[in-house]
Image (cartoon, coloured by chain):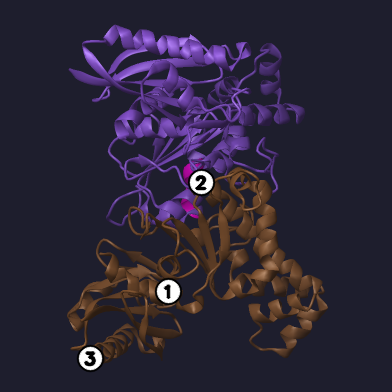
Chain colours: A brown, B purple
Amino acid sequence: MANYTIGVDLGGTNLRIAAVDEAGHLIEKLTLGTQVALGRDHVVNEMCGAIQQVAERHQGSSELRGIGIGVPGIIDMRNGMVRQSPNLPDWVDYPAQTEIEKRLGTRVFLENDANAAALGEKWLGAARDFDDMAMLTLGTGVGGGIVLGGRIWRGMTGMAGELGHMTVEPDGVRCGCGNTGCLEVYASATGVVRMAREAISGGAVALGRAASADAEFSAKAVYNLAIQGDEDARKIFRCVGRALGIALGSMVNALNLPMYVVGGGVSSAWEAFSPAIFEELRWRSMVYKATAPESLTDGPKTLITRALLGSDAGLYGAARLPMMQ
Amino acid sequence: MANYTIGVDLGGTNLRIAAVDEAGHLIEKLTLGTQVALGRDHVVNEMCGAIQQVAERHQGSSELRGIGIGVPGIIDMRNGMVRQSPNLPDWVDYPAQTEIEKRLGTRVFLENDANAAALGEKWLGAARDFDDMAMLTLGTGVGGGIVLGGRIWRGMTGMAGELGHMTVEPDGVRCGCGNTGCLEVYASATGVVRMAREAISGGAVALGRAASADAEFSAKAVYNLAIQGDEDARKIFRCVGRALGIALGSMVNALNLPMYVVGGGVSSAWEAFSPAIFEELRWRSMVYKATAPESLTDGPKTLITRALLGSDAGLYGAARLPMMQ
């Protein structure tokens, strides 16, 4: 009888559930809408109901070893609390682990969603050959996760890996966290759209036209212009790359890891922003210089690459959590 | 028969040697000048001679378990090579470990001097109650060391912990490493003197008078003026604190460690620069905010404090190296 686990990616829009076996094979995947407006208990009931259905379908044939849940926001690992979550506004100091364990009678492991994504890419994605890695997830915000010795580095209170809130421009744009110049305000989808609107105010014609044509003007629209060669759009992705290069340069100097993975929706624009990352790294990080893939010294190299699992990274990582205990 | 080790702190000016027992008690300490101008072989011979004398004095009464050497510069841990050292210009790709083992017939462990200092503070200093910590050493440059799970985090090639070369002002002052705006150019003794000279050019009277009176105008002189209330000097230490606060904010967000130690010569000016560190941290780091000693949430706190071992941190850390194997 094969063992399996269930991973949950609890986003502000979608609630995704996957049953995964210990070799990383997907057994079943399910996507529901997250009806945040109906309140926390409704979301938890929907989630537990869906998990139970999945579990019942596999009862007898294989054993459920636990449930891992990736949650956006600040998780207190010591007592399984969701402290606060930007996308789940009424999950404040909510003892999610106990509540869900009570309903399901199965071990539950909570994790920050970006940490879960890092663990997913480490297990089955771009970093599968590395025990030490870090991942930046460029979405609505910028999440981060650090894996050391094959395990998520959680730090003292489970808050480690907030790489999106490293300062890259000390007097820069105000961030939702209270700081100015966080990586997040330059390398998130929100940041790309903000920079596009600033460019439009400054007279960027093609961007202005795209924004008028599209009520939901998005980072994707800016990317489409960038690949068509629009200089204003290209400049925005150079800013994305510069901010990432500054943050990654400091990370490489501090941690000297073999692998850094860039994922999340904005990473689809890799071609547009990655040249600026490497340009920054080559002069900002002495450790990168000494270990860059193109360097002539022998020995292991520092790799910086796109994620491989797309939006499933967090789902696989969540499923991996119960297997790591 | 008690075991002991010998730690060596190989600086550009002083060569210091200490015999330390496994409980951290100092058995003997020796300071020689490092005669860099006479060349590498001379320095190595002097060092090995002094180590041998110490070892002979304790022969019979206790057993030498190994020698740890803290070296400024880039160490390749895999093969015990000193890649390059700013203070030891002719130590380029020098197989120091093998060379010294050959002469002494004892196991030798090389380590970057700032990593050794971090290990020393972890073992016997400010971080002795913590298994996870980071240390910044503010000297001529700014060194760094990260200890995770009680052991130095060396990274892929032993280059981890270059915290002095984190970018804190992306368009800031040029650093010797090739980057602009490294922590080192604002928080080192060299940085303090540079900022003082800039202030003098801008009309800072008291600093100007101090510089004219003293051919070796130093960070200490700037500190003396700061504690006398000179606003220009105080402003310089606020810059030191701001740069440290930016770097520490990113470190706290990324690593969520319980303890960060600030040491090195410039840390004597702690009273002058530390208020600016905490001011920056309180708004730049969401993780610090949630875990600051003054925060009302329960749970463990993030501590940031002065080093306790002064200039002996690296010496004790070096002596600790053979005990960790």
Q: Is residue A74 above or below residue A5?
A: above
Q: Nearer the viewer, mark 2 or mark 3?
A: 3
Q: Secondary structure at mark 3?
A: helix
Q: Is residue B208 above or below residue B163?
A: above
Q: Quick one: A309 or A116, which is closer to the camera?
A: A309
Q: Quick one: A292 or A269, which is closer to the camera?
A: A292
Tag 3, which chain?
A
Q: Quick one: A114 or B107, which is closer to the camera?
A: B107
Q: Is A58 included in the stretch rendered in magenta?
A: no
- Label 2 close to label 1 by CB (< 8 Å): no
Residue B25 placement (x, y as % from top left): 26, 20
Amino acid tagged 1: Gly
Q: Secondary structure at mark 1?
A: helix
If the image is split into quadrants, where does the C terminus of chain B sit? top left
- The answer to whether B214 appears left or right of B117 in the picture is right
Question: According to the image, label 1 marks what residue?
Answer: A314
Label 3 Cα crowd, 10 Å radius (few <14 / some 14-19 / many 20+): few
- Please report the bounds of the magenta region as a residue range: B277-283
- The answer to whether A25 appears left or right of A270 in the picture is left
Residue A95 placement (x, y as % from top left): 26, 72
- The answer to whether B142 appears left or right of A14 in the picture is right
Q: Secondary structure at mark 2?
A: helix
Question: According to the image, label 3 marks what residue?
Answer: A56
Q: Which mark is residue A254?
A: 2
Is disc 1 on the same chain as disc 2?
yes
Residue found 47% across the figure and 37% down from its top: B77
Residue A128 placement (x, y as % from top left): 44, 65
Q: For residue A109, which quarter of the picture?
A: bottom left
